[in-house]
Amino acid sequence: MATKKTYKVGDVVARVSKPTILGTVIEVQIGKDKTDLSYFIKFYDVNNPGEYETETCTADELISRDSDFYDRKMANLNVGPSGGSRKSRRRSRRSRKNRRTRRVRR
């Protein structure tokens, strides 16, 4: 079997028709001969965080839409249900530590 990219539950994938919409794999169904996986994906709209749509697609469809996917994923990590602000995620460990101790000393 040729090695084919597979997706785990929780992976973020992009929507082919509307690239601004990113989805999270909710469940992976495995076909009879273990090669054709189909994925059930919940897509969150970047511009409209509350809304999502679901769709099922095969591994091939997913891989074909994956081309410039990673740039988009990095740009859109802060959308969807688990998104936080970039700033809050990027704060370094040292500055977290300093903020903690500063509060204590008062």
Image (cartoon, helix red, strand yellow):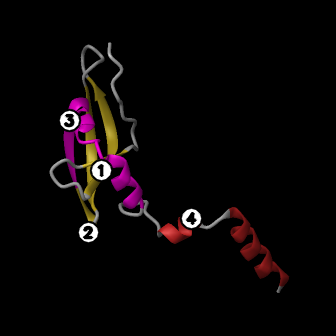
Is the Cβ of the residue at disc 4 closer than 8 Å to that at disc 3?
no
Q: Which percent across, then down, holds residue 67?
A: 28, 42
Task: Answer with mark 2 or mark 1, whichever residue precedes in sequence.
Answer: 1
Q: Is residue 100 left or right of residue 63?
A: right
Q: In this view, does 86 lie to the left or right of 2?
A: right
Crowding around mark 2 (Cα neighbors within 10 Å: few <14, some 14 to 19, many 20+) is: few
Q: What residue type is labelled 2?
A: Asn
Identify residue for label 2: 48
Per the model, the C-alpha gap separating discs 1 and 4 is: 23 Å
Closer to the camera: disc 1 or disc 3? 3
Task: Answer with mark 3 or mark 2, whichever residue precedes in sequence.
Answer: 2
Identify residue for label 3: 61
Crowding around mark 1 (Cα neighbors within 10 Å: few <14, some 14 to 19, many 20+) is: many
Identify residue for label 4: 90
Per the model, the C-alpha gap separating discs 3 and 2 is: 25 Å
Identify residue for label 1: 23
Q: Is residue 105 left or right of residue 26?
A: right
Is the Cβ of the residue at disc 1 closer than 8 Å to that at disc 4?
no
